[in-house]
């Protein structure tokens, strides 16, 4: 390399025309005025001057390597402090500055001290044509630490300290780009985490996530990486992992999570549904595809009963694509009136009358035929379609109830409400709008919500229920006995009916069964709180007799009648009543609101 053209530099900062050789110049004073430790070095690396800041820094660091004197070799000092490729390249750069091959040399470099590692920013500049250079060393430890902390935080989860989603994808993309690499991904989702959050609070939920992270990290193999995607989802990146090894690791992780956690003074148990992808021999090019397939396998594990392991197969992706297509079609189906309601009769056990119904939505798909709610309700929740879907059901059901009423068939109708509608904040307005548009009296409508959906925000749910009951609309807790069944929550909620979960009803044949005892307890509890009970899922005559004997107010199930279209229901009701139209059963909300008075025979 040829020397760069010289700038307008003095011949030698140590000498001036007319001065004697070695005469002191103002350069010493200038260097002393600099706040950073600074040296003046000749082309051979010999130290010509060291300013006061350098001397003070050497004393503070208390390290003999930095107690440098005039005449010492700066380049040798640098190598002694840190002999590595980076330092040698830095020294070579400083020499090039002295030779005029470059204007300056800068770099951050670490210095290991007994007190820890400190970082300095070196800047070398040529100051004369003789090749003398000034080298400043500024302590930038605070800046480097802040930058490193920021970089670490950008790539790690704040709660657990594990690699976050972005960093996991970065690591996985690096592995996938390596020749012959075949990393496996284990996607883990906690089963029961929401219940822990709801019952013990979010602080305890955070403690649980931290403990799960620690257990997973301890259980994986050396070289594996555990990360957290967010919420209660974790990922294990397993390198050079055979199919058998991946499944064995997944089972070990599942067993690790299954052990009880000591949280908030009690033993807490959760499970883990785990999906595996990357072990089939398929060559993945993108991390997003590999994680997506592991996620699909995890959801398949949940659908199969939770707390189990599932390996990805191509049919899972086909099913996911079909669900995505179905979700898009569902959005249009609401606007195209492809949805229909079927109505299942509800029996009043003391009188034997069927004067109530539950509205159950179906989808008349143009290609797949009549689809039950199990085929599309979950999709509606995932794609923010629950609220428009429920508005359609409310409008259709209330219009039909009003039409039956006008034809001399007065019925009380129940409509299912999702937790998503509760949290949306429009439930009361949507219900009142449907009643106003249809002209249906409010005492003819019952809203049904599951106890687990109410648990998401009990205070918000209670406030909306209170408004609805004041207007005369009844509120029912559906599937009671299938969740936590919190008594304190039950006391605080303004509801009038408890629907006993079918799992208790199915096992209640005979008064001596445990399920029958549970039903009797629920009936007694409901009466104590001024509520009535409905046994759902009644499929046999014995179950109906047991529900009646145990004091349930209402019953519903296939033994009484299956859900049917509106025109069939009207005929069924008239036929069953031998031509006498059924008498509408009054709701507790209607009585409490003063909308109607309770007939003596229904007390």
Image (cartoon, rainbow, N blue to C red):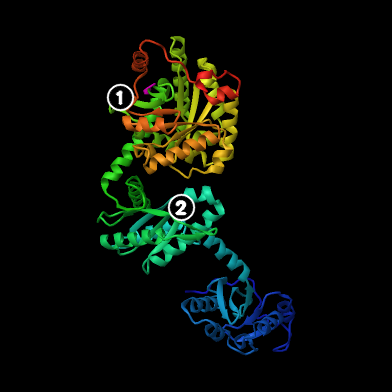
Residue at the spot 44% in from the left edge and 41% down from the top edge: 481
Real-space Cα separation, disc 2 to disc 1, in angstroms: 38 Å
In the image, residue 598 above or below residue 101: above
Badge 1 element = loop
Magenta part of the chain: 337-341
Q: Nearer the viewer, residue 172 or 13?
A: 172
Q: Main secondary structure of the magenta part?
A: strand
Q: Nearer the viewer, residue 486 or 280?
A: 486
Q: Nearer the viewer, residue 560 or 277?
A: 560
Give residue 429's position: percent from left, percent from top.
56, 26
Which residue position is annotated with label 2? Answer: 232
Whether residue 259 is visible to the viewer of this picture, yes or no, is: yes
Q: Earlier in the sequence, mark 2 or mark 1?
A: 2
Q: Is residue 232 left or right of residue 4?
A: left
Q: Is residue 395 left or right of residue 17?
A: left
Whether residue 156 is visible to the viewer of this picture, yes or no, is: no
In the image, residue 512 above or below residue 191: above
| In front: label 2 or label 1 | 2
Give residue 510's position: percent from left, percent from top.
35, 37
Q: Quadrant of residue 31?
A: bottom right
Badge 2 element = loop
User: Magenta span has 592?
Assistant: no
Q: Quadrant of residue 596?
A: top right
Residue at the spot 34% in from the left edge and 47% down from the top edge: 305
Give residue 178's position: percent from left, percent from top.
32, 62
In the image, residue 563 above or below residue 486: above
Mark 2 closeness class: few <14, some 14–19, many ≥20 residues within 10 Å: some
Instruction: Find residue 366 and name its label.
Output: 1
Q: Nearer the viewer, residue 484 or 304?
A: 484
Give residue 548's position: percent from left, percent from top.
40, 30
Name the outermost residue toward the left.
Answer: 281
């Amino acid at each position: 390399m040829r020397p760069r053209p010289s700038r307008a530099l003095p011949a030698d900062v140590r000498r001036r025309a007319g001065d004697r050789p070695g005469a002191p110049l103002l350069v010493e004073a200038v260097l002393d005025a600099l706040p950073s430790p600074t040296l003046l070095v000749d082309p051979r690396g010999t130290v010509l001057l060291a300013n006061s800041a350098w001397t003070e820094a050497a004393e503070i660091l208390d390290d003999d390597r930095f107690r440098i004197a005039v005449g010492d070799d700066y380049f040798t000092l640098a190598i002694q402090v840190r002999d590595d490729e980076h330092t040698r390249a830095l020294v070579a750069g400083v020499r090039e500055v002295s030779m005029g091959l470059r204007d300056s040399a800068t770099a951050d470099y670490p210095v290991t001290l007994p007190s820890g590692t400190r970082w300095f920013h070196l800047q070398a500049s040529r100051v004369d044509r003789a090749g003398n250079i000034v080298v400043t060393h500024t302590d930038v430890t605070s800046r480097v630490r802040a930058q490193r902390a920021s970089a670490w935080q950008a790539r790690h989860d704040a709660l657990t300290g594990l690699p976050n989603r972005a960093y996991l994808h970065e690591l996985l993309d690096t592995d996938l780009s390596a020749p012959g690499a075949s990393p496996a991904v284990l996607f883990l989702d906690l089963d029961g985490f929401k219940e822990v959050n709801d019952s013990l609070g979010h602080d305890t939920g955070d403690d649980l996530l931290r403990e799960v992270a620690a257990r997973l990290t301890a259980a994986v193999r050396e070289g594996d990486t555990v990360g957290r995607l967010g919420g209660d989802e974790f990922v294990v990146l397993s390198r050079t992992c055979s199919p058998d090894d991946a499944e064995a690791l997944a089972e070990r992780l599942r067993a690790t999570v299954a052990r009880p956690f000591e949280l908030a003074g009690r033993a807490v148990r959760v499970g883990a549904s785990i999906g595996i992808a990357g072990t089939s021999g398929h060559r993945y090019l993108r991390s997003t595809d590999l994680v997506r397939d592991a996620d699909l396998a995890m959801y398949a594990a949940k659908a199969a009963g939770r707390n189990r392991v599932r390996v990805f197969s191509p049919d899972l992706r086909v099913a996911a694509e079909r669900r995505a297509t179905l979700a898009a079609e569902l959005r249009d189906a609401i606007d195209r009136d492809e949805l229909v309601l079927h109505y299942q009769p509800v029996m009043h056990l003391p009188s034997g009358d069927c004067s109530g119904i539950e509205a159950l939505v179906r989808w008349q798909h143009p290609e797949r035929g009549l689809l039950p709610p199990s085929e599309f309700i979950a999709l509606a929740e995932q794609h923010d379609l629950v609220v428009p879907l429920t508005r359609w059901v409310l409008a259709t059901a209330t219009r039909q109830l009003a039409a039956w009423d006008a034809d001399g068939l007065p019925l009380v109708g129940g409509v299912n409400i999702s937790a998503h509608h509760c949290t949306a904040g429009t439930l009361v307005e949507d219900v009142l709008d449907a009643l106003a548009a249809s002209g249906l009296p409010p005492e003819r409508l019952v809203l049904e919500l599951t106890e687990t959906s109410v648990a998401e925000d009990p205070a918000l749910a209670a406030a909306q229920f209170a408004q609805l009951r004041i207007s005369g609309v009844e509120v029912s807790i559906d599937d009671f006995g299938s969740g936590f069944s919190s008594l304190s929550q039950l006391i605080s909620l303004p509801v009038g009916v408890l629907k006993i979960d079918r799992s208790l009803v199915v096992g209640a044949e005979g008064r001596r069964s445990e399920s029958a005892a549970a039903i009797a307890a629920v009936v007694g509890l409901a009466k104590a709180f001024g509520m009535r009970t409905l046994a759902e899922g009644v499929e046999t005559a014995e179950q109906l007799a047991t529900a009646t004997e145990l004091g349930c107010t209402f019953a519903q199930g296939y033994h009484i009648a299956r859900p049917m279209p509106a025109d069939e229901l009207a005929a069924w009701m008239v036929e069953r009543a031998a031509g006498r139209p059924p008498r509408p059963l009054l709701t507790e909300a209607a009585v409490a609101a003063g909308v109607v008075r309770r007939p003596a025979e229904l007390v």
